[in-house]
Amino acid sequence: MFYSKNLKKIKKIKHCFFSRKGGFSSGIYKSLNCGKGSKDNKANIKKNLKFVSKKINVKLNNLKLMHQTHSNKVIFVSKNNKRSKSFYSDALITNIKGYALGVVTADCVPIILYDRKNQFIGCIHAGWKGAFSGIIENTIKKFKSLNSKNDILASIGPCIGPKSYEVDINFYKKFLLQSKKNKAYFIKKNNVKKLFNLRKYVNDKLLRLNVKVDHVNHDTFKEKSSFFSYRRSQKLLEKDYGRCISVISLV
């Protein structure tokens, strides 16, 4: 389990970037797989989510997860929709005490957020597609529409590292078409491949939006014993992969 230095000081919230350790799943899902979209045993996933809920001190039904689609859609969890079993989005925000928001990842960037003045919490699933299409900007815009005064803290959790994220030239060109400044997030690996710094790309977007950022800096691809990784599973020709969970709650 990993924690933000900034958020850990705040008594009004609880949070955690969970590793893959301490759960009930086995095989390629060993052991704290929280990905409902995986092919893991559903009973084990439920046990894992119960473990997470207990650690974060909320009821299992009050841990709200997303059906993540690499979109730029943000949902506000209110008293009207809080009992919904599925939120089709890649970011959630709430101000309901006793509720937790969770994001599952296996190389993508998990971001948890806290608005100190208005007591809102949020979480973002930022893969390259969502980050590219505006999930971060849309989330901060939603915070502001809820009367946020730009006093937002964010923590960027474990994700694929810049030395592990290999992409092709077409991927690189797509980002350059968006902005020539995006060149700064790539380094050359060889004549046909680049290495992409997703963490910095996400970090800089948050900074430009006047969000205060800290990092729990681990490379999910390299640290096999601690994290699940979609890309590593692909490389090993595994049939599926687990997902780690990152959670924030209002006490």
Image (cartoon, rainbow, N blue to C red):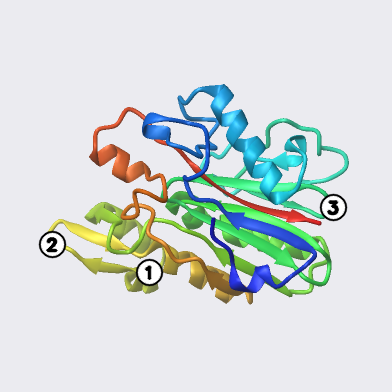
Please tell me which residue lies in front, 101 or 131.
101
Q: Residue at x 63, y 77 (%)?
A: 210
Numbered circle sitting on residue 97? 3
- Which residue is identified by label 1? 182
Label 3 neighbour load within 10 Å: few <14, some 14-19, many 20+: some
Residue 88 appears in the rendering = no
Give the residue type that dot 1 points to. Answer: Asn
Please tell me which residue lies in front, 98 or 205.
98
Q: Residue at x 29, y 59 (%)?
A: 172
Residue 130 appears in the rendering = yes
Q: Residue furthest left?
A: 191
Q: Picture coordinates of residue 183 (x, y %)?
A: 32, 70
In the rendered view of the protein, which quadrant contains the N terminus? Answer: bottom right
- Which residue is identified by label 2? 190
Is 45 rendered above or below residue 109?
above
Please tell me which residue lies in front, 24 or 76.
24
Q: Picture coordinates of residue 11 (x, y %)?
A: 78, 67
For discs 1 and 2, the disc positioned in front in the rendered view:
2
Q: Residue at x 37, y 33 (%)?
A: 28
